[in-house]
Amino acid sequence: MLEPHQKVAQKVLETGHAVPLDKESWENLRESVGIERIPPNASGHPEAIEEIRKIAKKTGFDKLVQGKEKQE
């Protein structure tokens, strides 16, 4: 797997979303246009993120997207 794809997959396992809102300014922007501060996806639900991680572990996806430094 190419490194950029690994990084995206790692973000999904870490936050539940491929493009997480890392800055409060994004949440403020979302609120200013009348939508929820946190998108209605797994990133706002810790139990969903844990479920994503369990699926990744059970399927071996977590190992596939592991960075080279973690594999050694």
Image: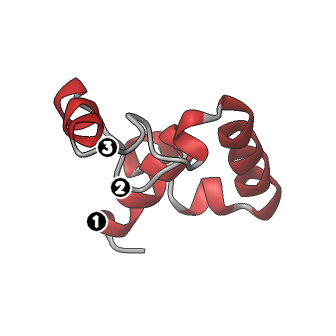
> Does the CB distance between marks 1 and 2 fall below 8 Å?
yes
Disc 2 on helix, strand or loop? helix
Q: Is residue 1 left or right of residue 25?
A: right
Q: Going 78% across and 46% down the picture, which residue do you hit?
A: 54
CA neighbours of label 3 inside 10 A, class few (<14), some (14 to 19), many (20+) = few
Residue assigned mark 3: 34
Q: CA distance from mark 3 to mark 1?
A: 32 Å
Residue type indicated by callout 1: Pro
Q: Going 54% across and 47% down the picture, which residue do you hit?
A: 40
- In the rendering, at what x and y percent does residue 70 appear? 47, 41
Residue type indicated by callout 2: Lys
The total of numbered circles placed on residues is 3
Residue type indicated by callout 3: Gly
Give the label, 2 or 3, closer to the camera: 3
Q: Quadrant of residue 55?
A: bottom right
Q: Quadrant of residue 58?
A: bottom right
Residue assigned mark 2: 7
For marks 3 and 1 on the same chain, the one whose residue lies earlier in the sequence: 1
CA neighbours of label 2 inside 10 A, class few (<14), some (14 to 19), many (20+) = some
Q: Residue furthest top?
A: 24
For marks 2 and 3 on the same chain, the one whose residue lies earlier in the sequence: 2
Image height of 31 relative to 42, above or below: above
- In the rendering, at what x and y percent does residue 1 appear? 43, 74
Disc 3 on helix, strand or loop? loop
Give the label, 3 or 1, closer to the camera: 3
- In the rendering, at what x and y percent does residue 29 appear? 19, 38
Q: Is residue 31 left or right of residue 41?
A: left
Q: Compare residues 52 and 32 and report the one nearer the observer.
A: 32
CA neighbours of label 1 inside 10 A, class few (<14), some (14 to 19), many (20+) = few
Disc 1 on helix, strand or loop? helix
Labelled disc at residue 4: 1
Q: Compare residues 48 and 29 and report the one nearer the observer.
A: 29
